[in-house]
Image (tube, rainbow, N blue to C red):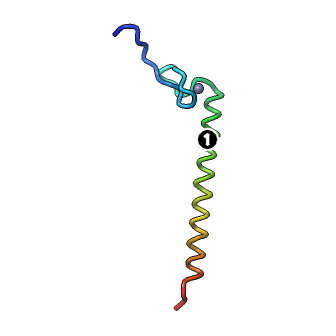
């Protein structure tokens, strides 16, 4: 099948890009960076919430 150039798609907007790059532009890279940060912050938030819940359970457990 001639005519098919090896390529991949920008993981942000889906545009065809060179096979060795992940993003089509700095803008898309920035978008992904922000998304990663947002997801990490969410994970930290959930972790802290879970930790707080466990402390509450521990404090509420009958002593002795
Ligand atoms: Zn893109």
Image position of 37 (left or right of 16): right
Q: Which residue extends farthest top?
A: 2
- Residue 62 % position (x, y): 54, 87
Vertical comparison of 63 with 28: above or below: below
Q: Quadrant of the N terminus?
A: top left
- Considering depth in this image, is 29 or 15 the residue closer to the camera? 15
Which quadrant of the render holds ligand 1?
top right
From the top left corner, tell me how far across and down residue 19 is, in percent.
47, 21
Residue at 63% of width from left, 46% of height from top?
38
Which element is circle 1 on? helix
Q: Residues within 10 Å of mark 1 (few under 14, many from 20)?
A: few
In the rendered image, the residue lying farthest to the left is 1
Residue appearing at x 57%, y 28% in the figure: 13
45 lies above or below 27: below
Q: In the image, 8: left or right of 36?
A: left
How many discs mark residues in the rendered view? 1
Rendered image quadrant of residue 15: top right
User: Which residue shows up at 50% across the image and 19% down it?
Assistant: 18
Residue where numbered disc 1 is placed: 35
Q: In the rendered view, does 10 fall on the left or right side of 27?
A: left
The image shows residue 11 at horizontal and vertical percentages of: 53, 31
Q: Is mark 1 within 8 Å of ligand 1?
A: no
Where residue 25 sits, quadrant-wise, is top right
- In this view, the residue farthest toward the bottom is 64
Residue occupying image coordinates x 59% and y 59%: 46
Q: Is residue 62 above or below residue 38?
A: below
Residue 43 at x, y percent in the picture: 58, 54
């Amino acid at each position: 099948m001639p005519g098919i150039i090896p390529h991949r798609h920008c993981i942000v907007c889906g545009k065809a890009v060179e096979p060795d790059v992940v993003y089509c532009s700095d803008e898309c890279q920035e978008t992904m960076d922000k998304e990663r940060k947002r997801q990490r912050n969410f994970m930290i938030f959930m972790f802290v919430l879970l930790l707080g819940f466990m402390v509450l359970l521990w404090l509420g457990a009958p002593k002795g």
